[in-house]
Image (tube, coloured by chain):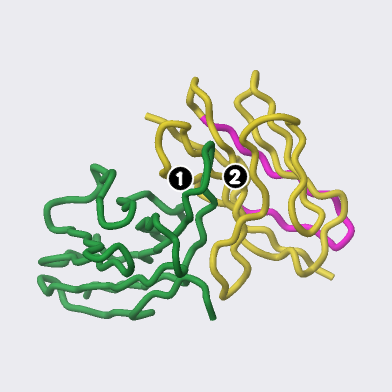
Amino acid sequence: DTGVSQDPRHKITKRGQNVTFRCDPISEHNRLYWYRQTLGQGPEFLTYFQNEAQLEKSRLLSDRFSAERPKGSFSTLEIQRTEQGDSAMYLCASSLVVSEPYNEQFFGPGTRLTVL
Amino acid sequence: AQSVSQHNHHVILSEAASLELGCNYSYGGTVNLFWYVQYPGQHLQLLLKYFSGDPLVKGIKGFEAEFIKSKFSFNLRKPSVQWSDTAEYFCAVSLRDTDKLIFGTGTRLQVFP
């Protein structure tokens, strides 16, 4: 399967614990995006990278959230001191910047986080 | 702040019925418009997109959407739905100066044989 992959697919944690998610984009895709989706809502943008540079962060991304893409390939999203409100599906997407005006984003299966 | 509204949260149809899902966005500048679909147990995938040119765009599986700039709308249509169209449908917008997608809340479509 050459699509976007995410690991783990499910994570259950206790409030206050730290969690880290991984996303592997489609090979050679230079942009990588993180979104969060809660029940009954559409995905909400969190942040995105072009290669290893983080180009934009949402105000939704509190200080407890940090994302990295150190070598411009896979990315990690870490949540420190998890809260029950962090329970959501965390989606990763990737795209290949070829030309404007848009770059199609391909989504992964998501990581479902449950904070008890 | 930019937003996307999907008026229908849950739509139930019989096979062969026609479908129209509403989508309105609030942004005065130039936008790219998308419909994504999520079939049960599968990833979000692109159904169709509009960024310029003919405001009537055709996507996969017989879907089409019409961009009406004056109404800030991008409604999704299909003349005759099939049971396999059962899925959740998301309208999304991206602004020309940024790459992030702004999604609506989604419409759950159930098609009965």
As shown in the figure, which amino acid type bears the numbered disc 2?
A: Phe
Dot 1: element: strand
Image location of residue B97, percent across then percent down: 41, 31
Measure how far apart labels 1 and 2 are at the Cα level: 9 Å
Of helix, strand and loop, which mostly describes the magenta segment?
Answer: strand
In the picture of the structure, the residue carrying the numbered disc 2 is B34
Say if labels 1 and 2 share a chain.
yes
Say which mark, if any, is on residue B101. 1
Q: Position of residue B29 (x, y in %)?
A: 49, 22
Say if mark 1 contacts mark 2, CB within 8 Å: yes
Range of the magenta residues?
A: B10-25
Q: Tell me, by letter, which chain the rendering colours yellow.
A: B
Left or right: A43 as drawn, with respect to B60: left
Helix, strand or loop at label 2? It is strand
Point out residue B28 in the picture as x, y percentages from the top left corner.
Answer: 49, 20
The chain letter under disc 1 is B
Instruction: State the residue at coordinates (19%, 73%).
Output: A19
Tell me what residue is drawn at x 71 percent, y 29 percent: B53
A51, above or below A111, in the image: above
Please tell me the numbered disc located at residue A106: none
Query: On the rendered image, what quadrant is the C terminus of chain A found in?
Result: bottom left
Tell me where residue B67 appears, x and y as whole percent.
69, 31
The chain drawn in green is A
**Foreground: B2 or B53?**
B53
Image: A86 above or below A9: above
A5 relative to B46 in the view: left or right: left
In the picture, measured across the screen, residue A14 lies left or right of residue A90, that is left
Q: Is residue B20 magenta?
A: yes
Mark 2 surroundings: few (<14), some (14-19) or many (≥20) residues within 10 A: many
